[in-house]
Amino acid sequence: MSELKNSRREFVKTATLGTAAVIVGSRASSYAQILGANDRVRVGIVGYSDRARQALIPAFLMHAKELNFELTAVSDIWKRRREEGAAAVGKLVGHEVAMARNNEELYERKDVDAVLIATADFQHALHGVEAVRAGRDAYVEKPMANTMDDARAILKAVEETKRIVQIGSQRRSGSNYIRANEFIKSGKFGDIVMVEMTWNVNQPGRWRRPQLFYPTVFATTSAATAFGPAAADAASTALGRWRIARRLYIRTPLAVE
C-alpha cells in the first residue's frame, strides 16, 4: 500500500508549486479560494455507530476546516440511525447532510469523494472493498478484517484500484503503549523469554441494547442484509485480536535458549 498514488491534495499542492511563477501577479487570497474549492474532500459516513458518533466524527471535525474536508452524507440501513446521523451531523457542520439507505445509494452520489467506515467489525473489509471498487478513498475503522479471506479481499481491492485507505487503530496510538514499546525495545528489561497477557472485563451489558434494537431493526431490514454471513463468528474474536495486535506491535523477539 506504500506505493499508492498521492492524494488529490498532494497533487494540487505540487502543481501549485510548479505554477507559482505564472500567478505571482494574482492576489493570494483569490488563488487560495480557487484552490480550496477544487481541493475540498467531501466525505460520507458508512454506519452511524457509537464509534462514528463518539470518536471519528469529533476527530474529523477538529481538522476538517484546516484540511478542507467536509461531511456530506450518511449511509445506514437502519432508518433510525440514518435519520439520527443526518440530523446530528447536519447540526454540527451547519448544512444539510444527505441520507443514503444503503451504500449503493451513497456511491451513486457525486458529492462523496471518500468515506469513514464505522460499521460492525465483521463488515469492515466488505465495506472497504465496496468503497474502493466504487472509486472512493476510505478510512476503515479497526479491525480491518475478522478473517484472512476478508483481509486478502480488501488488500487485493486496494492494490487493484490504487485508492487511498487508512486502517484505524486504538491502543497503538496511545502514548502509554508507544512508551512501553520504546522501553521494551531499549533492552532495559533484559532478555524477554515469555509474554503472558490477561484481560478481565466485567461489563455484561456492553454494546447490547435489546430494547432499542430488536423491535426496530428487524422491522426495517433483513437479517442477511444487516449482519451478513460473518456475524455468528464476530463475538468470539471481538477482544482477543486486540491483545494479539498489541503483542505484534511490540515485536521484541523472545530470547529462547
Image (cartoon, rainbow, N blue to C red):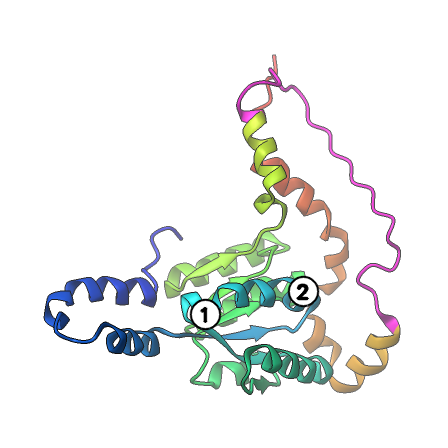
Q: Position of residue 220 (x, y in %)?
A: 75, 86
Position of residue 232 in the picture relative to residue 75 (left or right): right
Q: Tell me the tag on residue 65.
A: 1
Query: Quick check: 219 above or below 231?
Result: below
Query: Quick check: 227 above or below 216?
Result: above
Q: Quadrant of residue 67?
A: bottom left
| Amino acid type, label 1 | Lys
Q: Position of residue 98 (x, y in %)?
A: 56, 86
Residue 194 part of the magenta-drawn span: yes
Query: Quick check: 1 above or below 135?
Result: above
Q: Position of residue 215 (x, y in %)?
A: 85, 81
Of discs 1 and 2, which sits in the foreground?
Answer: 1
Which comes sooner in the sequence, label 1 or label 2? 2
Query: Circle 1 sits in a helix, a strand or a loop, which is it?
Result: helix
| Real-space CA distance between mark 1 and mark 2, rounded to the nearest whole angstrom | 19 Å
| Amino acid type, label 2 | Gln
Query: Quick check: 170 above or below 178?
Result: below
Residue 253 part of the magenta-drawn span: no
Give the class, few, some or many, for how many residues have Cα within 10 Å of label 1's Cα (few <14, many ≥20). Answer: few
Q: Are marks 1 and 2 in contact (CB under 8 Å)?
A: no
Please name the residue that numbered disc 2 is placed on.
54
Q: Tell me the tag on residue 131.
A: none
Query: Circle 2 sits in a helix, a strand or a loop, which is it?
Result: helix
Tell me where the magenta segment starts and ends, as one range.
Answer: 184-210
Number of callouts in the render? 2
Residue at image point 58% right, 25% down: 184
Residue at image point 68% right, 85% down: 83
* Quadrant the C terminus occupies: top right
Residue at image point 60% right, 15% down: 190
Give the class, few, some or many, for how many residues have Cα within 10 Å of label 2's Cα (few <14, many ≥20). Answer: few
Q: Position of residue 243 (x, y in %)?
A: 69, 41
Position of residue 82 in the picture relative to residue 128 (left or right): right
